[in-house]
Amino acid sequence: MSSKESSGDLAVSVRGVSKSYTIARNRTSHVTLTEAMLHRLRRPFAREPQDTFWALNDVNFDIQKGDVVGIIGRNGAGKSTLLKILSRITEPTAGQIDLFGRVGSLLEVGTGFHPELTGRENVYLNGQILGMRKKEIDREFDAIVEFSGVEAFLETPVKRFSSGMAVRLAFAVAAHLNPEILVVDEVLAVGDLQFQRRCLGKLDEVSRQGRTVIFVSHDMRTLRNLCPRGVYLRDGCVAAVGPMEDLIRAYTSEQEHDGTRLPVASGPVMIRRFDVRQSDERRAVIDGSDPFEVTVDFELIHDVNLFRLGIYLKTALGDTIARSFTTDWRPELEDLAAGHYRATLSVPGCLLMPGVYRLGLHASRYGIDTYIRDADVQCEITVMPPASYNTAHPAEHVDAAVLLRDGWNVKRRNPDDTSGNTQRHQTTFPAIAAPAAGVG
């Protein structure tokens, strides 16, 4: 990997980049610590079998100076690995990346921060990492503090910061210390709604200054509004490069036909099917107006008591917003005999705000053993706006996950009327008369 001063209009060149990881595969299951120790004593030089996982495989693309490029793809596609390589946090196994300019990155909460140093000290540390002189950092320091909103905590060690405070300061540093290439992961969404909007506005400002922005998000609305072009990753490979609108269309279409890789087995449980259906068809893009069903086909190899099967509904960032277990209201489902089962969970329409969500599957014996964790088996859905939903204010899509269905009642009232009587959905108001001539 190399970083160069200039190369015409080119900001980033990625050629044949691959990244592999070695994963130990322990085939021997030890019930107790004693058994594990005896196994090691009997075979002290035995090597556990290993697998090679390719997070990226022969990735090629170019980014021009001043471009705002979105990286899209489902979980595990290689997006985070690519950003870490672009940010020089890790090296590729093969291939070359040329970066024409200084790179500032925000990939994880507090990236590049030293936890024992204060907020003030970390601002200067990050500036030095970017190759800036103290005078340059001094010039931007007040703007960084104002943007981050953590002035009262500047002399506090960063380890005492909340995740939101750390993200605000980290983004402010990355955006204000003038890197030619700014790499941002979806972590900025940890902040509150107002700060998220300020971040997106800052990214737009940075791009207008001719700097390059590389942005990862699951929020298709944000990608569509912020990034004219993008790179679509699928299973560690480049599926397409081009206009963001075309990539979103291709990504959404493929999501319709791509489900969780099954079967998945753990203990006595084998998951044979896990998907979302609407109008009796498997869907990855959901019409927000209508209800949908989560369907799980599973097999129990033997009888299981205290059994729980559940669904976690999460935002694209992994925050849990709802959960439901078979035994929440049906205690008789705790004891199941061996056999094949189908479980369905109905989700009402007009419940979720437009956006991307993850459904995680959980299976366990309550308080005894967990067979399948919600991070192990997931599917992803994109919820489109309900037909009657007012989309004239798209910025409001990001400030909540649950949509309270229309129940508003607004009407003009006589201030002297204390009866409290209302007429539902009366939203027609008398015209307001124009002021008379010469008045005001």
Image (spheres, rainbow, N blue to C red):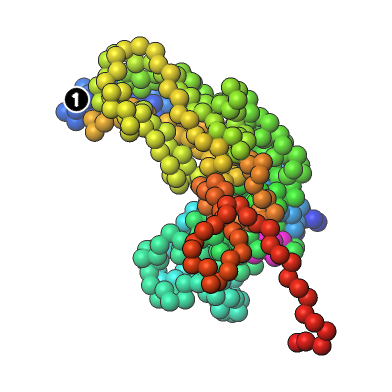
* Helix, strand or loop at mark 1: helix
Instruction: Report which residue position mark 1 lands on.
Output: 35
Q: Residue at x 36, y 32 (%)?
A: 325
Q: Quadrant of residue 360?
A: top left
Which residue is at the front of the view, 318 or 48? Answer: 318
Q: Position of residue 223 (x, y in %)?
A: 67, 49
Q: Position of residue 221 (x, y in %)?
A: 66, 48
Considering the whole magenta stretch, tell me its main secondary structure.
helix
Is residue 2 located in the magenta-colored stretch of the structure?
no
Q: Quadrant of residue 105?
A: bottom right
Which residue is at the front of the view, 240 or 130? Answer: 240
Decide: is 210 above or below 354.
Answer: below
Q: Residue at x 60, y 39 (%)?
A: 288
Q: Amino acid at mark 1?
A: Glu
Residue furthest toward the left?
A: 34
Residue 138 left/right relative to 308: right
Q: Residue at x 63, y 60 (%)?
A: 200
Q: Quadrant of residue 174?
A: bottom right
Bounds of the magenta segment: 202-207
Decide: is 310 above or below 439.
Answer: above
Q: Position of residue 173 (x, y in %)?
A: 55, 67
Q: Position of residue 109 (x, y in %)?
A: 47, 56
Q: Is residue 266 visible?
A: yes
Q: Residue at x 41, y 74 (%)?
A: 153
